[in-house]
Image (cartoon, rainbow, N blue to C red):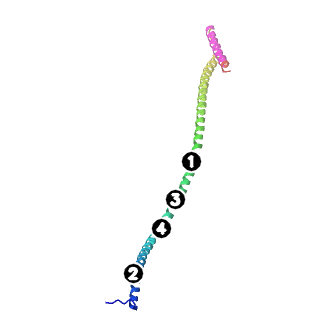
Amino acid sequence: MELELDGWKVKAALVAVAVVVIAAPFVRATLSNKGRAEDWHRRAVVAEESVTGLRVVIAERSRALNQRTVQANRLVSDLQSNGTALRRSKVSVGTLTRRQRELAAENARIESDRRKLRSRLATLESIGSKLSACVKSRAPAKGKRIVAARQATCNGVSASFDAYLEQAR
């Protein structure tokens, strides 16, 4: 068997083998890269869908957070208003407590004055009835003893009235 290397068929075969030997790895690498590219593309589509879903979730949570922030700000405002009202109420309670003590003291003083006035009234009523009896008994009496006793009683009542007037001053 003789090998002829000068023919076009051999040259074509050598070129074909060279192309296959050189091009085969490139074709294989190209197919592998194409598979990887498709895999990365699928991953990118899935990731983009996830990102879109996460954006929706983030937007919803941002809205909810904003609502909660508004609620918290309202609560803080209400709390401050209530705190101010509570401070005013405490001041009012203190003022009312002080005024209640003053009124209780004034009531006790008035009650004491009322008791004193009742006592004076009773004393005056007693003296008044005795003086009235003395005036009514000025009718002529039978006997000097009765007249002297009446006179002594009336003098005693008159002295009691004078003493009362002195004490009242």
Residue 39 pos. (x, y %): 42, 73
The numbered mark, 2 or 4, whose residue comes first in the sequence reads 2
**Residue at label 3?**
65
Viewer-side residue, 109 vs 73? 73
Name the outermost residue toward the front.
2
* Circle 2 residues within 10 Å: few <14, some 14–19, many ≥20: few
**Residue kind at label 3, given as amino acid type:** Leu
| Viewer-nearest of discs 4 and 1 | 4
User: Label 3's element?
Assistant: helix
The numbered mark, 3 or 1, whose residue comes first in the sequence reads 3
Q: Is residue 111 left or right of residue 46?
A: right
**Residue at label 4?**
51
The numbered mark, 2 or 1, whose residue comes first in the sequence reads 2
Q: In this view, does 2 lie to the left or right of 29?
A: left
160 is within the stretch colored magenta? yes
166 is within the stretch colored magenta? no
The residue drawn where x is 38% and y is 87% is 13
- Asked if labels 1 and 2 touch by Cβ distance under 8 angstroms, the answer is no
The residue drawn where x is 57% and y is 41% is 90
Viewer-side residue, 47 vs 59? 47
| Viewer-nearest of discs 3 and 4 | 4
**Residue at label 2?**
21
**Residue at label 1?**
82
Q: How far apart are marks 2 and 4 (CA)?
A: 45 Å
**Residue kind at label 4, given as amino acid type:** Val
Q: Distance between the residues labelled 3 and 1?
A: 25 Å
Quadrant location of the C terminus? Answer: top right
Name the outermost residue toward the top.
144
